[in-house]
Amino acid sequence: MTLTRFKKVLFVTPEMNPSQLNADYKNVRYVHAINQIFPSIYEQNPNIIVLDHNFLSKDMEKVVRRIRTNNFYSKIKICCYKNKVEPKADSLLKAIGVDYFIYEEELKAIQKSKNVLNVFTEILDRSVLGMLTNVSN
């Protein structure tokens, strides 16, 4: 399961850097305002949503719960981008429906020459492999 598998990606971030986009990803949309998240989801019907925890902070739980309780959004994967690991907060977000976590520490560990979408792909691959090894045991 790689990011290339996700044809439509929605990034909820305070800012965007267009140079980070890969030519293969034509259906990437950035949302910079909290009140535009759900209209954008409705318009684009993305396969994955990447939520910046620092940007949403206090609204993160509300947004994730709203996505998970609506049947229209049931097939959308949710990815949370955070600066650092916080076990208590991460376990709550995982319980309410976040599928993947991406930490800034992990991004720094991966080569800087790769663009952001390739980094997300590599992290998602690693987390899926981790889930598969847990299931096999």
Image: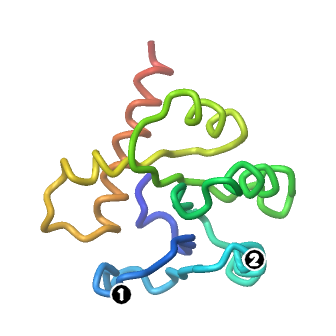
Q: Is residue 134 left or right of residue 92?
A: left
Q: Position of residue 120 (x, y in %)?
A: 37, 58
What residue appears at the point 43 percent right and 62 percent down from the top-left corner?
A: 3
Q: Quadrant of residue 48?
A: bottom right
How far across and down, in percent of the image, does residue 123 sit? 34, 49
The image shows residue 65, relative to residue 113, as above or below, that is: above
Up-down relation of residue 103 to residue 8 (above or below): above
Q: Secondary structure at mark 1?
A: helix
Q: Residue at x 39, y 42 (%)?
A: 84
> Which of the 4 image quadrants contains residue 99?
top right
Q: Residue 17: x, y in percent?
A: 35, 82
**Residue projecting furthest to the front:** 58
Is residue 106 visible in the rendered image? The answer is: yes
Distance between the Cα atoms at labels 1 and 2? 22 Å
Label disc, if present, on residue 18 of the rendered structure: 1
As shown in the figure, which amino acid type bears the numbered disc 2?
A: Asn
Residue that appears at 51% across and 75% down? 14
Which residue is denoted by mark 2 in the rendering?
Answer: 35
Disc 2 secondary structure class: helix
Observer-nearest of 22 and 59? 59
- Report the residue that reaches farthest toward the top: 137
Q: Image point 35% across, 58% down: which residue?
A: 121
- Which dot marks residue 40? none
* Observer-nearest of 134 and 91: 91
Q: How many marks?
A: 2
Pick the front one: 135 or 72? 72
Task: Specify whether 13 is left or right of 92.
Answer: left
Depth check, mark 1 against mark 2: the one in front is 2
